[in-house]
Image (cartoon, rainbow, N blue to C red):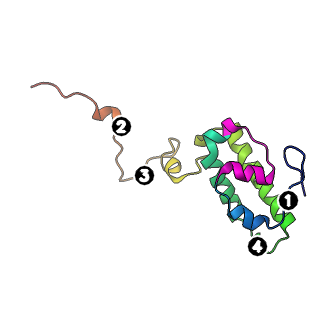
Amino acid sequence: MNCSADGRPIDVTGILSRLKGLSAAEEFFALLGVSHDPKVLDVSRLHIMKRVGQYLAEEDLSDLPDQVVAARARATLQRAYEEFATSSPLTHRVFKVLKDHDPNKPATPGRAFVPFESVLKRFPKE
């Protein structure tokens, strides 16, 4: 299998079930041997992992050999990481809340937007 960031071979045995058992982003990077900058991961970890999930959901990995699954998962993680290492999470708008509040999209008809600043304005004294 491919080598990890430090040049050691990656153990691909049962890789799919091992990936499913992970929870921390750092564990995915370590298992798949993808190097990363902790500062980038601190800022964009949820976005990176969400994007990896979106990419992997497009593939059927169930009947593939462990080596192929590991290679695809590694490439996918690397691809998602690179997206957020070179631009901000706001650029990609992975999460619904960011998509819904895209300043480049027109407002949804029937939904009024009240700027927070207008709520803070003082009323004239009587």
Q: Secondary structure at mark 4?
A: loop
Instruction: Check disc 3 and give the amino acid type.
Output: Thr
Cα separation, mark 3 vs mark 1, equals: 49 Å
What residue is drawn where x is 81% and y is 50%?
33
Quadrant of image for the N terminus: bottom right
The residue that mark 4 highlights is 62
Marks 3 and 2, the one that precedes in the sequence: 3
Q: Residues within 10 Å of mark 1 (few under 14, many from 20)?
A: some
Cα separation, mark 2 vs mark 4, equals: 48 Å
123 relative to 64, above or below? above
Front residue of 39/77: it is 39
Q: What span is in magenta?
A: 24-40
Q: Residues within 10 Å of mark 3 (few under 14, many from 20)?
A: few
Callout in the foreground (3, 1): 1
Cβ atoms at labels 4 and 3 below 8 Å apart: no
Marks 2 and 4, the one that precedes in the sequence: 4
Q: Secondary structure at mark 1?
A: loop
Cβ atoms at labels 2 and 1 below 8 Å apart: no
Callout in the foreground (1, 4): 1
Cα separation, mark 1 vs mark 4, equals: 18 Å
Magenta segment includes 26: yes
Q: Secondary structure at mark 3?
A: loop
Tell me the number on the disc at residue 115.
2
Callout in the foreground (3, 2): 2
Q: Quadrant of residue 71?
A: bottom right
Q: Secondary structure at mark 2?
A: loop
Marks 3 and 1, the one that precedes in the sequence: 1
Return the residue found at the far bottom.
63
Q: Residues within 10 Å of mark 4 (few under 14, many from 20)?
A: few
Quadrant of image for the C terminus: top left
